[in-house]
Amino acid sequence: MKTLLKFTKNVMTAFVFAGLAMSCSSGLQQLNKGNFDEAIENSVERLQQKPEHTKALSVLKEAYPLAVADHKRAIRIYENLQEPFRWERALAEYQQLNRIYEMVSRSPVAMRAVGLPQNYAHEAEIARQLAADERYQAGISALNHKENRLAAKDAVGQFQRVNELIPNYKGANQKVEEAFQYATHRVLIEPIYDVFRLSQNEYDVLQAAFNREIFRSKAPSPFVRYYTTNMIRQESLPQNDVVKFALVSLSSPSINVNKTVEHFTKQVKTGTKKLNDSTQTDVFETVKGTITTFQKSIVINGTMEMRVLDYKSNNLITEEARNETFTWNDTWKTFEGDPRALDGKTCPPRHASGSIEPTPYTLFSSLSNQFANYYQERLKKAYRNM
């Protein structure tokens, strides 16, 4: 037992040293590649495990001043750039300097190796303010052209970025809401036009299917909103598109029944009889049976049209006709004759019946769902990049 424990301890120790050696090697590799931040991180991790690790100390002493100088040089470049959003780049560099500060500060050994690290929290906060203000001004500039939906959409993005930098900087939340109103592409979905003249119940089923699929599904884009005619009366902002649906054809349910018949015949022993010489022989009887398989289908189909028009000009943008078919299927079997003829095969009931047949109303409801699902997907595809 002692031998086993000693062996296990030796193996674990070997793994630890192998890990330290690999990590140190990784830190040196990062240093040689010019990845100074990663070299510092690897070295600090090694020193937390083994404070006297000489190679990790050596890598840290060399990588730390190089990393600080590298980030400061990048900051000077960004601060002097005449490009949009330069302060966000400078902020990222300050944040990385603070990350180095935190790594080194957590390790007394690392601080003794490189000295007291500098905290750049104040500088980072100044850069954050400048970055937020730069984004805010870009948002205001875009919002000045809010009648252009793309400009308003850009304003939304700018103010959202402001909020990421400093929540509700200069009332950015209100600006986001204002820009969203003008960035939204509004689509009026008109009630279905019934060319076919359905019953009121059928029309209600069809309209309910479209309302459920289109209005209860997630919008294809944050900048797209669907409206009913009732909703449009409460909206003062301009609409963009009008979508018109029409049921233009509908078949009556078509019923088709096919049947296949299987015949079975078998000789069945019914007893024995004596012959004239007093010997016995088996007596057989021929038994017969029939399995009939019924396959019934009820089919209904129809055609709907979708037309998308410009709300202001009423010009046609696109149109599409879609034919859908719904098929209800049922299969059942019946048996006539002597079950012994089946020779072990499962015998269906003598008078089996199929499932409960759908009513014409139920068939039309299923067809309506297919239409609604298809057109909901078509609208999603058309508007997902708006």
Image: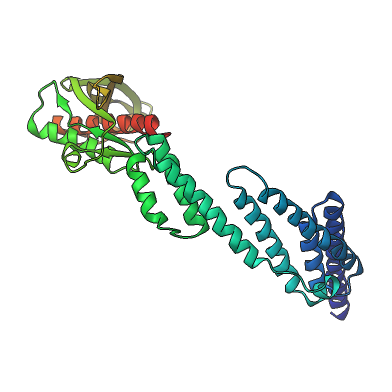
Q: Is residue 185 left or right of residue 65?
A: left
Q: Where the C terminus falls, by quadrant?
A: top left
Q: Residue at x 87, y 77 (%)?
A: 6
For the rendered model, the colour scheme is rainbow
For the residue pair 16 and 92, the one nearer the viewer reads as 92
Q: Is residue 193 left or right of residue 276?
A: left
Q: Quadrant of residue 225?
A: top left
In this view, which residue lies farthest toward the bottom?
A: 2
Q: Position of residue 277 (x, y in %)?
A: 38, 27
Q: Position of residue 238 (x, y in %)?
A: 26, 35
Residue 331 appears anywhere in the view:
no
Q: Residue at x 68, y 48 (%)?
A: 80
Q: Residue at x 26, y 34 (%)?
A: 239
Residue 381 appears anywhere in the view:
yes
Relative to 373, residue 112 above or below: below
For the residue pair 68 and 6, the one nearer the viewer reads as 68
For the residue pair 359 and 262, the one nearer the viewer reads as 359
Q: Position of residue 267 (x, y in %)?
A: 35, 26
